[in-house]
Image: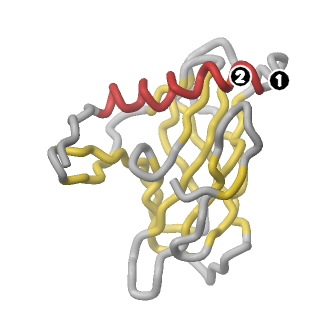
């Protein structure tokens, strides 16, 4: 199968622009904050080292926000990655610099796009539990949230604006 390579900046714009119109219609237009709507971490299967994390982040402010990192005392490492497809090969690469989230738009992390790579759990983890996370932005602000833990190969929330969210397997 042939696929076109999309650089990281273009993919960020694509992820954000395709959700911005839906997001404006369904979010409370009075919400002037940045909010984490869904945060999920898929646990790794036995013997694997890495977990994947997915967030939906709504920027209800009028200004662009730059996501610098996601932190949790429950893990030794959380990094933001992007999937780059070259020909038939998909590679995950760390994101260099802040991830832009324009005002009144949403960043939707999902498989095959922007996502979190998570390793080195600091304690026992079980599907169904929630772990604390903190989003760190380039202006120094932090947003506390929690992420729901899913079983290995668990189905993430299929987040579509204008429709009811449900389990999907993106």
Closer-to-camera residue (140/106): 106
In-image side of 10 versus 22 (left or right): left
Alpha-carbon neighbours of circle 1 within 10 Å: few (<14), some, or many (≥20)? few
In-image side of 120 versus 133 (left or right): left
Residue 54: x %, y % from top left: 55, 52
The residue at the far front in this view is 1
Residue 112: x %, y % from top left: 39, 49
Colouring scheme, one of rainbow, by chain, secondary structure, one colour: secondary structure
Residue at 48 percent across and 26 percent down: it is: 100
Under circle 2, the secondary element is loop
Residue 160: x %, y % from top left: 65, 38
Which labelled disc corresponds to residue 28? 1
Asked whether disc 2 touches disc 1, contact meaning CB atoms under 8 Å apart, the reply is: yes
Residue at 65 percent across and 18 percent down: it is: 104
Residue at 62 percent across and 41 percent down: it is: 56
In-image side of 31 versus 167 (left or right): right
Under circle 1, the secondary element is loop
User: In the figure, 35 relative to 29: above or below?
Assistant: below
Residue 98: x %, y % from top left: 43, 32
Q: Which residue is mark 2?
A: 60
Closer-to-camera residue (34/90): 90
Q: Distance from label 2 to label 1 (Cα)?
A: 8 Å
Q: Earlier in the sequence, mark 2 or mark 1?
A: 1
**In which image quadrant can residue 101 be found?**
top right
2 or 1: mark nearer the eye: 1
């Amino acid at each position: 199968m042939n696929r076109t390579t999309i650089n990281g900046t273009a993919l960020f714009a694509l992820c954000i622009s395709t959700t911005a119109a839906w997001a404006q219609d369904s979010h409370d237009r009075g919400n002037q904050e940045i909010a984490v709507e869904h945060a999920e971490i898929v646990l790794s299967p036995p013997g694997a080292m890495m977990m994947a994390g997915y967030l939906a982040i709504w920027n209800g402010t009028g200004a662009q926000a730059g996501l610098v990192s996601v932190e949790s005392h429950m893990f030794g490492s959380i990094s933001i990655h992007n999937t780059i497809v070259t020909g038939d090969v998909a590679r995950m690469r760390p994101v260099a610099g802040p991830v832009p989230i324009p005002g009144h738009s949403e960043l939707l992390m999902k498989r095959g796009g922007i996502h979190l790579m998570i390793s080195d759990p600091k304690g026992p983890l079980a599907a169904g539990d929630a772990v604390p996370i903190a989003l760190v932005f380039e202006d120094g602000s932090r947003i506390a949230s929690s992420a729901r833990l899913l079983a290995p190969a668990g189905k993430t929330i299929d987040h579509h604006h204008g429709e009811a969210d449900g389990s999907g397997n993106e």
